[in-house]
Amino acid sequence: MKKPAPALSKSPSLWLVEAKSSSPRPENNMRFKDFIGEVKAKLNSSLCLFAAALLGRHTEYCDLPDGFLKQDFSALEIKLILVLRGHKKEWLEPVSDALQKSLWSAARIWGFPSGNVVVINDEMAKRLRLIED
């Protein structure tokens, strides 16, 4: 089943993006599990850092714009995006499936659908204006 790439949204949203130059093949079970675990840890840490910033836990390091701080965060759409450079579209689905499964509990805790955990390649990221040439 083909999964859609994230779309630019008009509603307030938070996109947390991790980029990698490569990923191990799913057939290489241990390396692949380690890779998914590493990406999961980074995206979870990004969510926690976001919450810590909103709670004012690190004011000396945090200079978020006033407009950002005045958002209704209960309505904020959260997307966790992994960009894999040079990957063909058909290579993305197994990585996406594994990452969605590994971040299922985070999606439940933060109240966003696991479908908001998305894996895209660099060409898709360019179309979404996440990266430039």
Image (cartoon, rainbow, N blue to C red):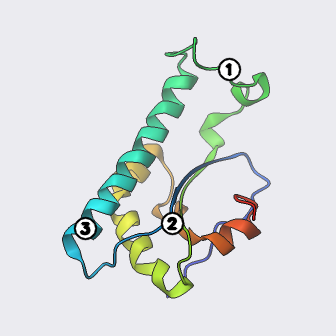
Q: Position of residue 111 (x, y in %)?
A: 48, 48
Considering only vertical position in the picture, is 25 above or below 100? below
- Assess disc 3: are there few (<14), some (14-19) or many (≥20) residues with their C-alpha within 10 Å of its C-alpha: some
Instruction: Kindly report the distance in space between the C-alpha atoms of the residues bearing marks 1 and 3.
Output: 38 Å
Give the residue at x 67% y 72%: 124
Q: Amino acid at mark 2?
A: Gly
Instruction: Kindly report the distance in space between the C-alpha atoms of the residues bearing marks 2 and 3.
Output: 24 Å
Residue 2 can be seen in this image: no
Dot in front, 1 or 2: 1
Front-lying residue, 44 or 26: 26
Mark 2 vs 3, N-terminal side? 3
Q: Position of residue 36 (x, y in %)?
A: 33, 62
Give the residue at x 61% y 76%: 4
Instruction: Kindly report the distance in space between the C-alpha atoms of the residues bearing marks 1 and 2.
Output: 31 Å
Q: Secondary structure at mark 2?
A: helix
Whether residue 25 sits left or right of residue 69 in the image: it is: left
Whether residue 61 sits left or right of residue 63 in the image: it is: left
**Pointer 2 residue:** 115
Q: Position of residue 21 (x, y in %)?
A: 50, 65
Q: Secondary structure at mark 3?
A: helix
Q: Amino acid at mark 3?
A: Arg
Mark 1 vs 3, N-terminal side? 3
Q: Residue furthest left?
A: 30
Q: Amino acid at mark 1?
A: Asp
**Pointer 3 residue:** 31
Dot in front, 1 or 3: 3
Dot in front, 2 or 3: 3
Q: Which mark is residue 85?
A: none
Give the residue at x 48% y 78%: 92
Mark 1 vs 2, N-terminal side? 1
Q: Quadrant of the C terminus?
A: bottom right
**Pointer 1 residue:** 63
